[in-house]
Amino acid sequence: MGPVTLSKQNRLFWLGRYAERVYMTVQFLMKAYDSLLDSTAIDYADFCRRLGAENVYSDAEDFCRRYLFDENQPCSVRASMEALLGNGMVLRETISTPTLSYLQMAESAMEMASRSEAPAVELQWVLDDIMAFRGSFDEAVDHEGVRNITKTGGTVERLSLMLRLGWQPERLRQEMRKLLNRLYKTDLVTDPEALKTITDYAVEEADIPKPELLRCVEGLFVV
Amino acid sequence: MEDLIRHAEQINRQLARHGVKFGIYKNGTFEERLFPFDAIPRVITAAEWEVLSRGLVQRVRALNLFLKDIYGEKRILADGVVPEEFVYRSPGYLAQCEGILPPGGVYSHISGIDLVKGKDGVWYVLEDNLRIPSGASYPLIARGLCRRCSPETFRHNAVMDNRQYGDLLRRTMDSVNTGGINVVFTPGRYNAAYFEHSFLAEQTDSVLAEAGDLYVRDNVLYYRATHGDCRVGALYRRVSDEYMDPLAFEPSSLIGIPNLMAAYRAGNVAVLNAFGNGAADDKGIYYFVPKMVEYYLGEKAILHNAPTYLPFYEEDRRYVLDHLDSLVIKDVAEAGGYGVVFGSKLSRAELARMRDTILAQPRRFIAQEVIDFEDLPIMEGSDRVERKADLRAFVLSGAKDTVAWPSGLTRFSRNPDSFIVNSSQGGGFKDTWVLSH
């Protein structure tokens, strides 16, 4: 593992963020898709609002399909998958060709899912490939600091989605403590105010409004 | 071999999994395509390779000496072996390189020599690529995947291993390194050969860098790292000369490194391949390579050029104009299969226009006899068909030695009526086997 530039640090961080975004959103949408089979209503407009995505969908079915696969929508999972693969491609010499191949496979599975009448089967491959990517990444990247940049990116994305989707405080605090433990194993530059707020919430169990927490999580790292 | 062909689909799936692609700009949009792979390899016997590799090494040694000479003493010009104007009017000649001796005295570290095998069994060199020849990564990765998909094939055939290319390249970089890290320098993600740039960085354990990652201070090249900047000792650049340093070459370049030329001139960084190599792989200069071999090495050239005529010389011009309809005309300023015209395919009016253009700009063209080169079998669905194919052989030159890589990129035309094998024009590739005995 050679030296790391700021631009590479940024790519590693976003590699983790996009991997988590694809992973969590696919899981969420697979559940939503399943609910539709029983004609259970899903509040996709609320989902879009929470994630800051434009609601351009005609109905729940349209939402499930296009939020997953419409590559022209910048918020779609497909677009995140492309960004994930794109970040991986510019990091090949750091993460290794075998690790990158799992992202290529995840992207291919996503493409196949988009053409399938039963997309959940292929989407399961997307999740499997991302898990394999994480395992391979852990094996291939010797430098702990580098590994932790990507893992930190993943935790930040998870927290961001958890906050937006209204997860329980205990679960949030648990995840934030993980983030704080990992923080010192990276060279990432942090915003002191955001760090204090997150520490107060996670460790001191201070009562902090979620929008404020979200702002701190998103602005914690200067990358 | 049949076992390998049976596994062709599996191999192509593996290539897709590993993102073996090349980029192409179509209607202004960047697209990445899988590089179609045909499982039937080109086979070169041990005896054939013995001659071919000696010829390749000989040719590249002569070309390196030529570059050293024209940017230095200019003996070959003074002795009238190569006319001055073929050097100085070549777009690849860079006056900025005058008097610079690169680290280790090597100019072309990675040379891609394009050859075809005639139906007479003779190998002909079609072109020397001494600037940034691409393609080694494709047979390199394909070999590993073929071995995985069809181990039996490699158990029963004595094929020389080609997977040491990364080590060879790294040794080449190390041998000219002036002290510091090795860097592969890419124009970025949207370059046609980006797969190769990133793959070779991985294979050589180098750092992959783009323009913003590198800077020059006090005539030394540095890589901008978070733990303090690192000195760069060898820069394997995959960017054309003109974009490498906006202060020395094209001022509008945003993908270069300002002042790199100053660091290079000071001898503080090795640039692979050196600047100004275009003066030696110009299609016009090609004509003179066998003469260079004799001039510098005192040996007869082992490899043949395709029979070539220079309209620049009156006698050749007369021949070219008289036989225009049977020759292939190449514009010396073009590359990648562009600017190649087969006289037999031109209408009467087009031939007349070509004749006028040659008369007006004789230095701009070379003309070659059409070599009836060997077809190679490829699989088209379940059918075995014959297609035109060439070979790009790679020769690596370090400070101490020059070696030919026992493999190469065999490219084939997928169009039955075409001689053009370039990937940018729809061609595919094969592995190239060199048998060990």
Image: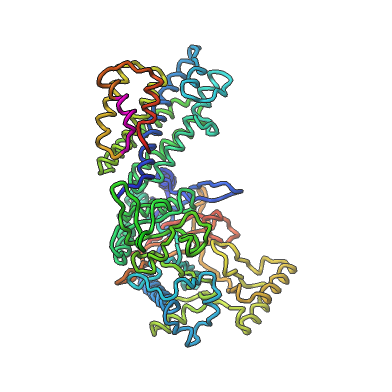
Q: How is the image coloured?
A: rainbow
Which image quarter holds the C terminus of chain A? top left
B302 to B163, vertically: above or below: below
Does the rendering let one see residue B44?
no
Q: Position of residue B55 (x, y in %)?
A: 40, 74
Residue in front for this viewpoint, A83 or B32: A83
Q: Position of residue A18 (x, y in %)?
A: 40, 34
x 50%, y 18%: residue = A44
x 51%, y 48%: residue = B381
In this picture, residue B220 sits left or right of residue A71 = left
B428 to B357, vertically: above or below: above
Magenta segment boundaries in residue numbering: A188-198
In this picture, residue B76 sits left or right of residue B333 = left
Q: Position of residue B147 (x, y in %)?
A: 34, 51
Residue in front for this viewpoint, B315 or B2: B315
Residue in front for this viewpoint, B293 or B14: B293
Q: Position of residue B254 (x, y in %)?
A: 49, 54
Number of disc labels: 0
Does the rendering let one see residue A130?
yes
Query: Residue reaching furthest bottom?
Result: B79
Query: Residue reaching furthest front?
Result: A193
What is the chief secondary structure element of the magenta stretch?
Answer: helix
Q: Is residue A5 magenta?
A: no
